Image (cartoon, helix red, strand yellow):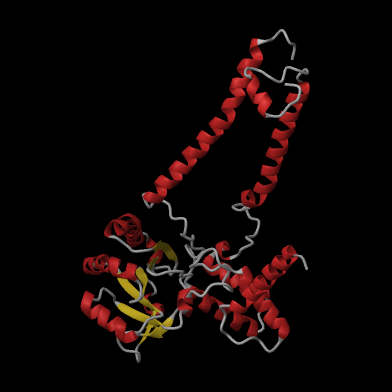
Amino acid sequence: MTPAARTAAAGVLLLLALRAFAIDEAPAFADEARQARYEALTQELRCVVCQSNSIADSNATMAADLRRQVREMIAAGKTDDDVRDFMVARYGDFVLYKPPVTGRTYLLWASPVLLLLVGLGSALYVIRQRAARPLGAETDDDAPVAAQDGDPRA
Amino acid sequence: MAPESGPVPVATGRARALVPALLFAVLLVVCGITLYKISNRQLDLHEIKSPLIGRPAPAFSLPSVADPTVTVSNATFAGRTYVLNVWGTWCAECRAEHGALLQIARRGGVAVLGLDWKDDRSAAIRYLAELGDPYTAIAADDDGRVAIDWGVYGAPETFLVGPDGLIKHKHVGALSMSDWDKEFAPKIAALAKSPGGAP
């Protein structure tokens, strides 16, 4: 093993070990499928007090109360959507890390695509501008700028 | 571009150089306005808009803080305008708003219900003996279930419920008299006038 590989392996092990510091003290469900749903749901619901932790990662007492709520609803045979609806009815879309696409959130969802389009548009514009210039005309007002660009024709 | 149009590229070159500067200026202005609003408390980035505004107030029946054998239920206040204040002796901001609550109670006209959230009963009784008791009745929400039903995510929070049983307003954080006069008093006056609540 090379030193670099050893460091990488140590890093991965360290990250895995972090799972051992779970905050949830409640006993696991006997049924594995239910435990998996519980873990997925509590990861997905955002802690409203700490505001950038999921409720699975937060130890605020509020988060513990919300985890208990999720646990009880799963134990009572409620579906994942029932749990989500319960939380959204009380805390709004904010409680979901993945807010639904609605009239108010479409901009949030569209913004990555919009930004990409703006970026592509400006890149195309710049490329076209450069391509349209005759050779040697790169230096408009001051030569040093072009020299810094590393353009051999400058 | 033809080579004879010499001076033109200079001008457009300068104009183009201004574009990033202008964009940056816009960014600075937006940041400045946002920071100004935050510092003036016009904007709270942590505030979560309650989906419960305009919806029926969740019903609760809990033991009273003063006497656990007595039940405090908001059904008792149906048909009346009331305020529900969520507090706890562990909550420093609650202490800060206590004076305003006392003043509101002295003014009268509206019942002030307390929801003592995840608190120790004897500590609550001591706290009220020390600072005064503005509450018409206080429900003890020991396990925090009623608080979840009301979408509470921090204390103090203050709700206004109309005679129709709908939540009219929610204030997050310590309530001051100016908050009360701005946010609650006009709504309470309007509710008193409107025939909606009358049978």
Give coordinates of residue A76: x percent, y percent.
63, 85
Give coordinates of residue B188: x percent, y percent.
33, 61
Note whether residue B173 is visible: yes
Residue depicted at 65% across the width and 13% down the height = B8
Occupied quadrant, residue B193: bottom left
* Left or right: residue A27 compared with residue B75: right
Q: Residue furthest bottom?
A: B69
Residue depicted at 47% across the width and 55% down the height = B45
Occupied quadrant, residue A27: bottom right
Closest to the observer: B53 or B151? B151
Note whether residue A76 is visible: no
Residue depicted at 66% across the width and 28% down the height = A148
Closest to the observer: B132 or B91? B91
Quarter placement of the C terminus of chain A: top right
Closest to the observer: A14 or B45? A14
* Left or right: residue B36 compared with residue A106: left
Give coordinates of residue A9: x percent, y percent.
72, 69
Quarter placement of the N terminus of chain A: bottom right
Occupied quadrant, residue B163: bottom left
Q: Is residue A119 above or below residue B22?
A: below
Give coordinates of residue B142: x percent, y percent.
42, 83
Residue depicted at 44% across the width and 80% down the height = B60
